[in-house]
Image (cartoon, rainbow, N blue to C red):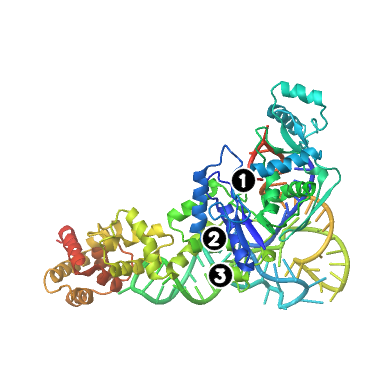
Amino acid sequence: MRLRFAPSPTGYLHIGNARTAVLNYLLARKYGATYVLRVEDTDMERSTRESEASILDDLRWLGIRWNEGPDAGGDFGPYRQSERFDIYKKYTDVLLAEKKAYHCYCSQDELEAMRREASEAGRAFVYPGKCRRLGDTERAALEAQGRKPTVRFLVPDDETVVINDHIKGRVVFESGNIGGDFIIVRSDGVPVYNYIVIIDDTLMKITHVVRGEDHLPNTPKQVLIARALGLPVPEYAHLSLVLGSDRSKLSKRHGITSVDVYRREGYLADALVNYLAMLGWAAESGEEILGVEEIARQIEMGNLARSAAVFDFQKLRWMNGMYIRACDLGKITDLFIPHLSDAGYDVSGLDRSWLERVIDAVRGNCEVLSDVPRHAALFLDEIMEPDAEASAMLEEPDSKAVIAEAYRLITGELNETTCAAELVGRIKKNTGMKGKKLFMPVRAMLTGSLHGPELDVTVPILGYEKCRKRIEYIHGRFAG
RNA sequence: GUCCCCGUCGUCUAGGGGUCUAGGACACCGGGUUUUCAUCCCGGCAACAGGGGUUCGAAUCCCCUCGGGGAUGCCA
């Protein structure tokens, strides 16, 4: 069994394509299939090597591994379509020789005019087959005008194409209504997708084509090509589409659609893969937080959803938060570090175990990795400027006594070894304050905020020095 | 317009003739824990698109309507 993912390197890896890649990968794991990566770069204007590199990089980041591909090699290469033009040329020559395809001299402007005319008349545009039977003299005349022909596939009349799709079931198309003879080679000699995709799929011995549903209407064209060429047809599984909140095809205006951006914002690859898999699939147990191996064990081509799914950014966030909390502390610390650096914190000189304590204290408040600077600031900064709420608390008359006592203790009887354990207790004992009147001013002094991890956790991590600096600062500002 | 796909809570879904007063999850709303926030726990709200069949019995099978989406490119 051989599966494939065939991205077009015309931009970043889109979330919808990522889902196709992920599902193919999951299915490959499930069935022990070979995973082939093929780069479909025949759109010479838009395809770039940079884009290809970034897509491959994003796929690797997602944890997807392929057995054959442009970088990995394999027995069925080359794996870039731009490097396979000589192969396609042979098939084109055969089609032309057998009169299953023909040269078309209609210009883009002429075609455009016909299309507009059809659309204004409320008709479907079907190429009328104008160039189907051109005589040699006519051809010569057209060539003399400097026209470069395209190659059109001659769609046979009255052929039925039945796709027994693994997801959609039996889908029937009549050759008469797929839009007429379609172009398979551009006038500059570069073949088009609908033509070569089937050649490559059969040449690369792909047994199952798992791709987006948007390809379903084009499938009969591909099957017809295969028939004309006498090539075998792979089995198909067309995945339902991913939609935006307004139920149209997911695009930028709905939110983030680039895998790369999710990566940079601090989504975990495992969480994204998990979420993408759940978009159109459910475990028998109803569990939703599942690792790749477990999903691969349970998923099947036949139990994927038939209907389109709306991408729920909120649920992805929730799931990411779950992964952040469940992750191994050392590993999640490594993942958080770049986000702290980006926010301007130099963590290289910090004690690793201390940093892990910080991360452990704040990870519960993070849904994405980039949330961390906001929450870790109270440990990493030297002084915390109290926010409006905290300032108001520190202005309270009852807080004055707490501030004064904290200042007296921290500059007197408390030290490195006793601070963590005794600070709060002694303030309570010596001021008589308790409950909110005790904890809130202390919290405000130490963290500049009324919210955050428990003081019992916070104070020991902060340590004597930071507590002292902060209390002195607050004392200077709010005492008296 | 034409062809194709799809239609269960707001969203992702479970369900595949009786076990469905339709289950779970996110979101939302309450409550509890946390003397704070987050987490966590408990509870609540909320759906079979509509109409016809078939059947003793339909969310489940069939047909029609409506709705949504995709394709209809010298893009992929």
- Does A200 sit left or right of A294 as displayed? right
Instruction: Give the image location of residue A236, x and y in percent.
Output: 71, 57
Of labels 1 and 3, earlier in sequence is 1
The residues bearing labels 1 and 3 have C-alpha atoms spaced at a distance of 32 Å
Residue type of the residue flagged with mark 1: Gln
Q: Chain of mark 3?
A: A
Label 1: few (<14), some (14–19) or many (≥20) C-alpha neighbours in 10 Å: many
Q: Nearer the viewer, mark 3 or mark 2?
A: 2
* Front one among A286 and B10: A286
Of labels 3 and 2, earlier in sequence is 2
Instruction: Give the image location of residue B72, x and y in percent.
Output: 72, 40
Label 3: few (<14), some (14–19) or many (≥20) C-alpha neighbours in 10 Å: few
Q: Are marks 1 and 3 in contact (CB under 8 Å)?
A: no
- Location of the N terminus of chain A (image quadrant): bottom right
Instruction: Give the image location of residue A218, x and y in percent.
Output: 72, 47
Mark 3 falls on what kind of element? helix
Residue drawn at x 51%, y 45% is A51
Residue A256 visible? The answer is: no
- Residues behind callouts 1 and 3 on a single chain: yes
Q: Which residue is mark 1?
A: A81
Residue drawn at x 81%, y 23% is A137
Instruction: Give the image location of residue A178, x and y in percent.
Output: 78, 43
Q: Nearer the viewer, mark 1 or mark 3?
A: 1
Label ID, residue A28: none
Residue drawn at x 26%, y 62% is A393
Residue type of the residue flagged with mark 3: Glu
Label ID, residue A65: 2
Q: Are marks 2 and 1 in contact (CB under 8 Å)?
A: no
Q: Which residue is mark 3?
A: A293
- Location of the C terminus of chain A (image quadrant): bottom left
Q: Classify A63 as above or below A8.
A: below
